[in-house]
Image (cartoon, helix red, strand yellow):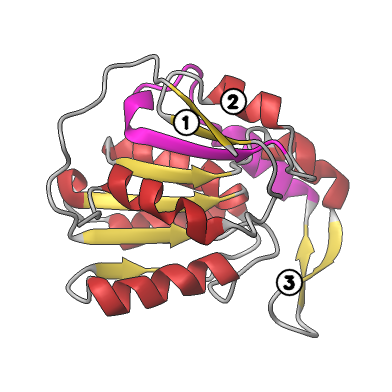
Amino acid sequence: MTTRLAPGAAERPPARQLTHLLYLHGFRSSPQSAKARWMADWVTAHRPDLAWACPQLPPSPAAALADIRAIVAGWPAASTGVIGSSLGGFYATIVAERLACRAVLMNPAVDPARDLAAHIGRQTMYHAQGESFDFRAEYVDELRAMAPPAPLMHPENILAIIAKGDEVLDWREMTARYAHGPMKLIAGSDHGLADFESHVPDLLRHLGLAS
């Protein structure tokens, strides 16, 4: 069961046909996550003309943001879309605010500097067995320094898909952060959105990719 919350800001006119799409994975995740692979397969099958990017983001948030900015440099904001999950949703918010482009966030991290302070040290990757990385104390400072403004400047551009069943992040904090834009609040589900495919129609519609 889902509940739709009306946006507090006026909806934008229909987006121009998307030409560029960026997917940003979460903490300890990768382009091999189920959602990232599903979207990559969808692009291949339905929109092979799209410029598609789903980079492996480095552990350093400053380096990750530099990589993201290098990818979108020169992309046309009016026909660019970005999708972000968890920490990737935090980064996607930064991109959407900077470019004033459309974005879809799935259980987005609201205050990753606070949340990830407890994860300083050696971390393993979810989708790369045997691979690990160091999450350093200075990375928390990097996250704190890049936090988007509150309130957001372009909340109408951002669709937040939020699960009450998220076992990692507080759905109340997420809904408060993105309260002024379009939102889909899911009664159950989980942090990884195991039911992701059922929410794809809303994602595509917001990005202007629905047929």
Image x and y of residue 97, in percent: 36, 33
Tell me the CA gap for discs 2 and 3. 26 Å
Residue 14: tell me if it is visible. Answer: yes
Determine the CA span between mark 1 and mark 2.
8 Å
Q: Which residue is mark 2?
A: 175
- Amino acid type indicated by mark 1: Met
Quarter of the image where the C terminus is located? bottom left
Q: Earlier in the sequence, mark 3 or mark 1?
A: 3
Task: Give me the residue at 39% from left, 14% from top.
Answer: 8
Amino acid bearing label 2: Thr
Foreground mark, 3 or 1, reads: 1
Image-quadrant location for residue 3: top right
Label 2 or label 3, whichever lies nearer to me, is: 2
- Vertical position of residue 150 compared to residue 207: above or below: above
- Quadrant where the image shows the N terminus: top right
Which residue corresponds to mark 3? 126
Q: Are marks 2 and 3 in contact (CB under 8 Å)?
A: no
Residue assigned mark 1? 183
Q: Magenta part of the protein: which range?
A: 137-164
Q: Badge 1: how crowded within 10 Å, few (<14), some, or many (20+)? A: many
Residue at left 64%, top 60%? 194
Q: Nearer the viewer, residue 71 or 183?
A: 183
In the image, 115 versus 164, the foreground residue is 164
